[in-house]
Image (cartoon, helix red, strand yellow):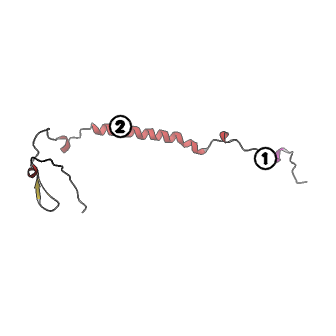
Amino acid sequence: MSEKRRDQPSARVKPKPKRSQVRSTSSKWWPYAIAGGVVVLVAAFVAVTQLGHSGSGGAAGAGLAVGSPVPTDSVPSSDGRTVSLNDFRGSKLVVYFYEGGG
């Protein structure tokens, strides 16, 4: 009596939908990822172009003219001696400022 018959509609099992008919929840984030990427690229482009033309002034903005002599400053070296740029006059020089580790 309590058994259901197979020909009754409530006893039928619905077939699974095809994979093409099922919309995955993981595909919903793609538009947001693309929009976010575009925003990041535009912001980076604007930042780079604006920083390149900012002309902040300061020590770097008040630089020397090409071919003019370098100021004769003296600075302490890492071993305690005093080094002047005049010591290297006539030779090529790379100046490297290192803050130090302690």
* Residue 91, x across and y down, in percent: 12, 48
Q: Secondary structure at mark 1?
A: loop
Is residue 96 shown left or right of residue 33? Answer: left
The residue that appears at 14% across and 40% down in the rendered structure is: 64
**Amino acid type of the residue tagged 1 in the rendering:** Val
Q: Position of residue 92 (x, y in %)?
A: 14, 47
Q: Which residue is mark 2?
A: 46
Q: Residue 87 vs residue 97: left or right?
A: left
Viewer-closest of 79 and 9? 79
Quarter of the figure with the N terminus = bottom right
Q: Are marks 1 and 2 in contact (CB under 8 Å)?
A: no
Q: Which mark is residue 38?
A: none
Residue 99 picture quarter? bottom left
Q: Residue furthest front?
A: 91
- As measured in the structure, the alpha-carbon distance from the residue carrying label 1 to the one carrying label 2 is 58 Å
Q: Looking at the image, is mark 1 or mark 2 earlier in the sequence? A: 1
Which x, y percent locates residue 45? 36, 38
Q: Residue 86 appears at what percent x and percent y?
A: 8, 50
Instruction: Classify 10 Å Cα crowding around label 1: few (below 14), some (14-19), many (20 and above).
Output: few
Question: Does the stretch in magenta take in 83?
Answer: no
Residue 87 or 4: which is nearer the viewer? Answer: 87
Secondary structure of residue under mark 2: helix
Q: Find disc 1 in the rendering and name its residue.
A: 13
Q: Which residues are magenta?
A: 9-13
Considering every residue shown, the one lying at the far right of the view is 1
Rate crowding at label 2 as few (under 14), some (14 to 19) or many (20 or more) other CA atoms within 10 Å: few
